[in-house]
Amino acid sequence: MSENQQSRRGAALRLTGVGRDFGANTVLRGVDLQVAAGEFVAIIGRSGCGKSTLLRLLAGLDRPTRGRIALGTGEASGSARIMFQEPRLLPWARVVENVEVGVSEAEAPAARRARALALLGEVGLADRAEEWPGVLSGGQRQRVALARALASRPELLLLDEPLGALDALTRIEMQRLLERIWQHQGFTAVLVTHDVSEALALADRVVLIDRGTIALDLRVDVPRPRRRDRPELGAMEEQILDRLFDGATTSPATAAA
Amino acid sequence: MTTTTTSVLPVEARRDEAAPRREVPAWLKGSRRWLADAGAGWLLPFGLLAVWEAAARLDLLTETILPAPSAVLLAAWTLLLKGELLTHIGVSGARALAGFAVGGLIGFGLGLANGLSAASRTLTDTTLQMIRNVPHLALVPLVIIWFGIDEGAKLFLVALGVFFPIYVNTLLGILTVDPQLIEMGRAYGMSNTALFRRVLLPGALPSIFVGVRYGLGIMWLTLIVAETIAASSGLGYMAMQAREFLLVDIVVLAIIIYALLGKLADSVARALERRCLQWHPSFRNS
């Protein structure tokens, strides 16, 4: 595991006036967001608020109608990897071959295999390398997907509710794994979720999106590893939930222009 | 005979395929492995043979209607010694394989092209679907006019018959590959070649195999008809010659050889399928 570049930092991310329309329907309007290198940001909001659209823009799977997304020095999608809500493993490829999908095709086959095995070790699945994805549990599949996402040493990791479908215990286990790997590798992480406590457990900053724009940007200054019963976290959770459910009545004064 | 060929629907083939893999009741599970090991599939054919032989021995069957299996076997031996049998099997086998290769490759190629390119699909699919609805055996008179009773006629008919199941199932296979996996491939920077090799082709393979197995059935059927109507060699010709001289044992022999060859082709396809689709839940334990 010494080949992991621990000193490597994530990429900074800057969104300026990003908007996205689908026909006449404006899903995102004027999102301004800056994420520092190596920062862990959680984006939360109710379903349909545009958070997944935003993540797809960051992943380069979709183009913004307006505005600019800059990653590090260049344009987005250069060294960004997305982890989807579903594992999306190739059922006809062995676990280790699935992780190799994440490694650049330019590398030699032996190097790709070694890198994939190292990452499987990191997510605790080294002994399952030769299995078919179909025999793994949901949590294990998502861990393979995480290994695949990290295989190219991304500077930005985008997570589209990857833990949403897991049971409560597996979920907590995955959150710890994610936090540990993030601390170890130092990439920038953007997590989309609708679980407020998950956002508070993992993120340096929680960004709330409401009606296509940023409604709240909250810094979570709680030392890691975080215990779930910390009173600060409880207070912040209240604040976010209040903002989420009052969003319909209060005017979006906090929204960035 | 033509009506059976018009029902070439990939959907039916799929249903056929899913049927034997249904959940087995608990009381059958123990005996199931033993049955499979002993080749239980052959119990019924051999049982029928025994009944048939007995019926012939007891003079329940007239020799001119249906000769005894032993008589058929004797005919096979005689023809084998004369060298005729192997020649006919060889000729028919070569025709079948050549027609399958030509029709299968064109079907596979067009299926891929139309699955991957919407432009190609718009351009050709309507035409192909129209032709598909013409029973290819209805073309026999036309084909005889075009090719006479040459090899070309058989090749053309077999290729045409095999083409459609493979085309339709390849197209279907490519079009039904999980779009989420395709999106993943693109998001992970796969080139078009890599996407095809790692996502599209393996994803379409189960469906392509359905097409291949169906195509093999059509291959034999077409060949039998073509050889029966217009040929100067091959198993169908052998059967027709025998009919002229009322050699019922040889007619029956030809039919049995067709059945065995058909079974052989299907077994090869199944073995290939098991090898290529190891990942598939249906094949994992076999």
Image: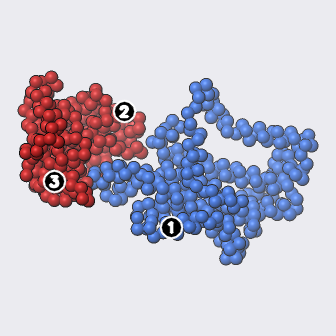
Chain colours: A red, B blue
Answer with left or right where residue A239 lies relative to residue B273. left
x and y, in percent, of residue A74 in the image? 13, 57
- Residue B126: numbered disc: 1
Amino acid type of the residue tagged 2 in the rendering: Ser
Task: Judge by depth and name the residue closer to the eye, B247 or A250.
Answer: A250
| C-alpha distance separating marks 1 and 3 | 43 Å
Disc 3 or 2, which lies upstream in sequence?
3
The kind of secondary structure element at disc 3 is strand
* Residue at point 59%, 46% (across, down): B16
Q: Chain of mark 2?
A: A
Circle 1 packing at 10 Å, graded few (<14), some (14-19), many (20+), is: few
Quarter of the image for residue B117 reads bottom left
Q: Return the residue found at the far front.
A: A249
Amino acid type of the residue tagged 1 in the rendering: Thr
Circle 3 packing at 10 Å, graded few (<14), some (14-19), many (20+), is: many
x and y, in percent, of residue A234 in the image? 13, 27
Nearer the observer: mark 3 or 2; the answer is 3
Residue A51 shows in this picture: yes
Task: Judge by depth and name the residue closer to the eye, B261 or A241.
Answer: A241
Q: On the image, numbered disc 2 is attached to which residue?
A: A137
Both labels 3 and 2 in a single chain: yes
| C-alpha distance separating marks 3 and 2 | 39 Å
Q: Chain of mark 3?
A: A
